[in-house]
Amino acid sequence: MTFSIVGYDAKEKEWGIAVQSKFVGVGAVVPFAKAGTGAVATQSYANTSYGPQALELMAAGKSAEEAMELITKDDADKELRQVGLIDASGNPATFTGSKCYNWAGGVTGKNFAAQGNILVDEKTVQAMADTFIETEGSLAERLLSALNAGQEAGGDSRGEQSAALLVVKEKGGYGGFNDRYIDLRVDDHAEPITELIRVFRLQQLYFAPSKPENVAAVEGSLKEELTANLLRLNYLKAELENDEELYKALTAYIHTENFEEREQETGKIDLEVLEFMRKQ
């Protein structure tokens, strides 16, 4: 009832899953991942114990294929299940039980496994595989592009309802306290993948680090525009007495809008913050 892709980025040491289903809250059921260990997508009458079990096995050094064999071998209903795994080294494995509803199947390649069931046809899974291979960018961007391509190729034969994206990396979570680098869900929506991509871009705006090329000095016309926007948004009074007042107002704006991750040294601004301000 679902299609998904699990993937690995060897350079950034990230593991992740993107998934869509005609099923409410798919993100609460399918994805499991742990930094330094791997990622799991368990679906089609999902046995959610597969997630923790596979991660425990891969943490102990089992490959994705070995973990797959172990988690499924004693499950009396394994022929109803579908699972995709990526291990600590990016080795993939996918399993589709013989009783999964058609169309059902999966494909693996370097650093990914894509699978789906109750699909229009095999083109969905192949589109996910091809897109993941051909797309450049972060792991999250590649997973989302692959998921979107799968939908455009046919997707779930019953339609759309929910989607999720989970990416883990060591100390990647908020404040560096856990590995939950990106954890986003759209639980019920007419176009869940499109909405998930929108929410991902918003998440990146708030939490991705500033790009050096987007950091600019607050001077000249940029200073005038910043002042005008802070006036318009009531962070400044009508008359600006000094630069200290301007930077104090900018700091207040950044903290109010939760842009702490993009806060710069005094006298500079991330242009993506200014662009957000323009649109308010």
Image: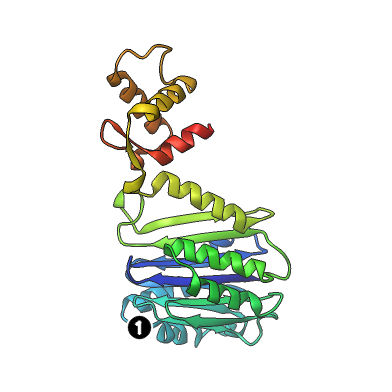
Identify the residue at image location x=38%, y=33%.
254
Q: Residue 126: image x %, image y %? A: 59, 78
Decide if residue 43 is on the left or right side of residue 241.
Answer: right
**Which residue, as the protein is rendered here, is positioned at the far right?**
158
Identify the residue at image location x=43%, y=27%.
225
**Which residue, as the protein is rendered here, is positioned at the far front?**
220
**SS assignment at label 1:** loop
Q: Residues within 10 Å of mark 1 (few under 14, many from 20)?
A: some
Identify the residue at image location x=55%, y=68%.
146
Measured along the vertical axis of the image, is residue 84 above or below residue 141?
below
Q: Residue 223: image x %, image y %? A: 37, 27
Quadrant of the image occupied by residue 171: bottom left
Count of numbered marks:
1
Quadrant of the image occupied by residue 44: bottom right
Give the amino acid type for the residue marked by disc 1 in the picture. Answer: Lys
Quadrant of the image occupied by residue 130: bottom right
The residue that disc 1 covers is: 62
Location of the N terminus by quadrant is: bottom right
Color theme of the render = rainbow
Q: Residue 275: image x %, image y %? A: 47, 37
Front residue of this view, candidates 209 and 21: 209
Q: Is residue 73 visible?
A: yes
Q: Is residue 49 visible?
A: no
**Which residue, as the protein is rendered here, is positioned at the far left?**
265
Decide if residue 187 is on the left or right side of residue 103.
Answer: left
Identify the residue at image location x=34%, y=78%.
89
Front residue of this view, candidates 109 and 49: 109
Decide if residue 193 is on the left or right side of residue 73.
Answer: right
Q: Residue 179: image x %, image y %? A: 35, 59
